[in-house]
Amino acid sequence: MDWSPAKSESSLPSPVRSRSRSGSPSPPPPKTITINLFPLTDSIEFAPKHLSFSPDQEIKVGRVSGSRNQKEAKADNGVFSCDVMSREHALLKEENGKILIKDLKSTHGTFVNNVRLGDGTVESDWRVLNHRDIITFGHSVRRNQSKSYTYCLS
């Protein structure tokens, strides 16, 4: 997991703001945060994800469902094609400059650096994420002798 404010926020010079008819400067552009998720070598394979959002938004992470109303897995959303994830698995948000995650009572858990968030019976508390933390959505489940599901890692 890698995150940073958009370049326009920190490394580029401040843009010249236009003025409204009243002569006051227009408001600055909204802040954008991007979280980058990459599969690890023992993960279910998925294309890297780049989740961009504003501080007032939460990003829902979950599994693709058969519903016509459900989003499909794309590089810019929190939807994965992974059998060990719940449809509504976890939430990500920014608060006071920190990225936070919480588990939404998922069946197979959300883990940060191999530590499970909550126990699956209630939503977990929010947990601060750090640069390069390993987030695991779900865990291996053996359904029968011939079929096994593996981790969904980010």
Image (cartoon, rainbow, N blue to C red):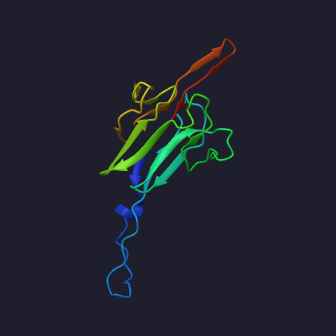
Q: Is residue 143 toward the left or the right of residue 115 in the image?
A: right
Q: Position of residue 148 (x, y in %)?
A: 63, 19
Q: Let me know if residue 132 appears in the view.
A: no
**Farthest residue in the top direction?**
145
Which residue shows up at 69% across the image and 39% down it? 66
Say which of 121 and 65 sits in front: 121
Q: Is residue 24 positioned above or below 121 on the image?
A: below
- The answer to which image quadrant residue 131 occupies is top left
Q: Is residue 68 positioned above or below 153 on the image?
A: below
Which residue shows up at 37% across the image and 84% down it? 19
Q: Is residue 29 toward the left or the right of residue 69 in the image?
A: left
Q: Position of residue 39 (x, y in %)?
A: 54, 36
Say which of 129 and 4 sits in front: 129
**Farthest residue in the left direction?**
96
Say which of 126 and 16 sits in front: 126
Q: Position of residue 99 (x, y in %)?
A: 37, 45
Q: Is residue 27 positioned above or below 150 on the image?
A: below
